[in-house]
Image (cartoon, rainbow, N blue to C red):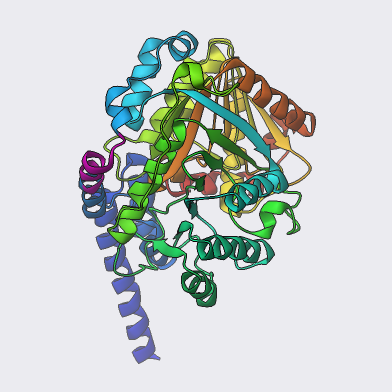
Amino acid sequence: MQFDLLHVGTLVALAHILGVVAACHAILNTRTSQGAIAWAVSLVAMPYLTLVPYLFLGRSKFAGYADARRVENELLRARAHPPEWDEQASSTGLPMQALGARLVHSLTRLGGMPFLPGNSVRTLVNGTATFEAIFEAIENARHYVIVQFFIVRADALGEMFKDVLIAKAKQGVRVYFLYDSIGSFDLPHRYVAALTAGGVEMHPFATHRRFVNRLQLNFRNHRKIVSVDGERAFVGGHNIGVEYLGARPPLSPWRDTHIEVRGPAVASIQFVFTEDWHWATQQLPVFDMPAAPAAAERPAGHDMHCLVVPSGPADKQETCSLFFVEAINAARERIWITTPYLVPDEAVFAALRLAALRGVDVRIMIPCRRDHVVVFEASKLYAYDSLRAGIRIFRYQPGFLHQKVVLIDSMAAAIGSANLDNRSFRLNFEIMVLTVDRGFAEEVEAMLLEDFAESIEIDRNEYRHASALRRVLMHVARLFAPIL
């Protein structure tokens, strides 16, 4: 018995020593003070419970990778930057009238890309419409197809996707396929091997080029991009899996939104893919971009101004968080946001509260069903705090809400892959497309009004009537907000 107690005591002491070491590492390497405090306290107080999670989730500042990625992107932009970007300044006129000259200037500097006129954008509501449009575009491809998703599953939809890509590759169309190594961790080797054997250039995205670090769950590539022949591009919230078609209870029906972009902004979207592809493969994909038509030669309806905003942990600034802050601060009448996860950082949360205090109609739509327990409980507490500031919170009832949409006043809307959480703000690679056009904003407004009609607006009673245990769970869950 004495021998056993000695061993137990040694193990306990070792756990606490490792906890202190890990806490020091967290203080030095976590990007936010809130995250550093959360990790340090938990590692010192409860090393038995937090040491293993810290191995997987603790690194939120990866200086070596971020620096290498940043330098490489700067070199890549010098080599592969589309010439028209060097000659064409950001759109003047409509974007500046709608958002203000200072905001346009800050957003273009933040994302490193210009507002471009002459685009056409349409919403694709839910999975069936999205994948019908994507499949139709791929089937009509003549030169190349680029594909990038966070999650790829080898289910019925994944098999359809695989077959259509292999068919195009056999026709001589160049196909580039990038998937996240952790988001698609269960993708079987046979699936990748079949695509590669069929002529598709397929590669995983990982923070290390030579191997997949299964202990590194941060710095995931959360982008969803499809582009065909430089003419059409698709961006939004859908991944490749039958759940995105609403075929996986209990989260079905799945509510999500994609957009189809045509025009000069497609080049911006493709360049975001080029950066990721070059990191993963050290090669440049071959794109034959069509010449941009003159203003007088643009097809009818191609008069929208678009800004592509890529963001990620290698950025000099916290691009995604600052994008949301600027979008919220730009609102004069309304800011409507739909997001599956409501775990904002302090800057974004402060901007939302200030917007409500100055009389802006601030609405946030979140799911009533959960896919992540801790995130869901943390979201409840942020929802309650939002209500106290005058922000209106809605819970979507029919199924799981996964769309990422921002509507600003009556002229601007942004749709893409970024959630309203710290993981999107600081740890993931994301892409948003901001469109300035009254007609498109009205289309997004009509879509969101239908969603609000199928939602319930919550009040403070949700928190007040919660049991003491549930309240404790909410507060404990929010302690993990910096890594959610």
Count of marks overlaid on the render: 0
* Magenta residue check for 146: no
Residue at coordinates 64% horizontally, 33% vertically from top-left? Answer: 123
Residue at coordinates 36% horizontally, 58% vertically from top-left? Answer: 43
- Nearer-the-camera pick, 191 or 219: 191
Residue at coordinates 25% horizontally, 45% vertically from top-left? Answer: 76
What quarter of the picture does the N terminus occupy?
bottom left
- Nearer-the-camera pick, 393 or 97: 97
Residue at coordinates 45% horizontally, 25% vertically from top-left? Answer: 293
Note whether 467 is above or below 211 in the view shown: above
Q: Position of residue 80 (x, y in %)?
A: 27, 42
Quarter of the image for residue 162 reads bottom right
Note whether 459 is above or below 170 in the view shown: above
Q: Taking 249 as reference, is 199 left or right? A: left
Q: What secondary structure do most residues of the magenta stretch adopt?
A: helix
Q: Taking 175 as reference, is 24 left or right? A: left
Magenta part of the protein: which range?
72-82
Q: Does residue 202 appear in the picture of this structure? A: yes
- Nearer-the-camera pick, 287 or 157: 287
Q: Position of residue 31 (x, y in %)?
A: 31, 44
Note whether 317 is above or below 133 in the view shown: above
Quarter of the image for residue 207 reads bottom left
Note whether 323 is above or below 31 in the view shown: above
Q: Position of residue 230 (x, y in %)?
A: 46, 41
Q: Does residue 472 appear in the picture of this structure? A: no
Q: Position of residue 467 (x, y in %)?
A: 70, 45
